[in-house]
Image (spheres, rainbow, N blue to C red):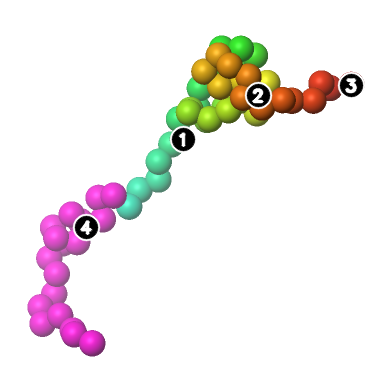
Amino acid sequence: MAHPKRRQSNTRTAKRRTHDKAVVPAIVVCPNCGGWHLSHTVCPECGYYRGKLAIEKEAAI
């Protein structure tokens, strides 16, 4: 396996590591029920996505 002949500079290392960071998830309020859910996903509270019923949710007793 090949080995580097010279040490990588700090700038070059930092350029490679610019994408290694934590990302805050995009959380939005559901317009149907007012619950919080991830953006571009079906609301786990009511089952609606973009104003239409996507999955049937059982009614709480």
Q: Position of residue 22 (x, y in %)?
A: 40, 45
x, y (%) of residue 15?
Answer: 18, 54
Verify whether residue 17 appears in magenta.
yes
Which of the marked residues, 2 or 3, is nearer the chain's N terminus?
2
Q: CA distance from mark 1 to mark 4?
A: 23 Å
Q: Residue at x 12, y 65 (%)?
A: 9
Which residue lies under the disc numbered 4?
Answer: 16
Stretch of the chain drawn in magenta = 1-19
Q: Which callout, 1 or 2, points at the residue further toward the start of the chain? A: 1
Residue 32 is left or right of residue 24, and the answer is right
| Alpha carbons under labels 4 and 3: distance apart | 53 Å
2 with respect to 25 (left or right): left
Q: Is residue 10 visible?
A: yes
Q: Which residue is mark 3?
A: 61
Q: Position of residue 31 (x, y in %)?
A: 56, 12
Residue type pointed to by label 1: Pro
State how far apart marks 1 and 2 are (Cα). 20 Å
Q: Residues within 10 Å of mark 1 (few under 14, many from 20)?
A: few
Q: In 3D space, how far apart are the residues under numbered discs 2 and 3 (Cα atoms)?
A: 17 Å
Q: Is residue 6 left or right of residue 59?
A: left
- Residue 45 visible to the viewer: no
* Mark closer to the observer (1, 3): 3
**Residue farthest to the left?**
6
Asked where in the image residue 16 lies, by quadrant, the reply is: bottom left
Q: Secondary structure at mark 1?
A: loop
Asked if disc 1 and disc 3 are in contact, CB closer than 8 Å, the reply is: no
> Local crowd at mark 2 within 10 Å, few (<14), some, or many (≥20)?
some
Residue matched to label 1: 25
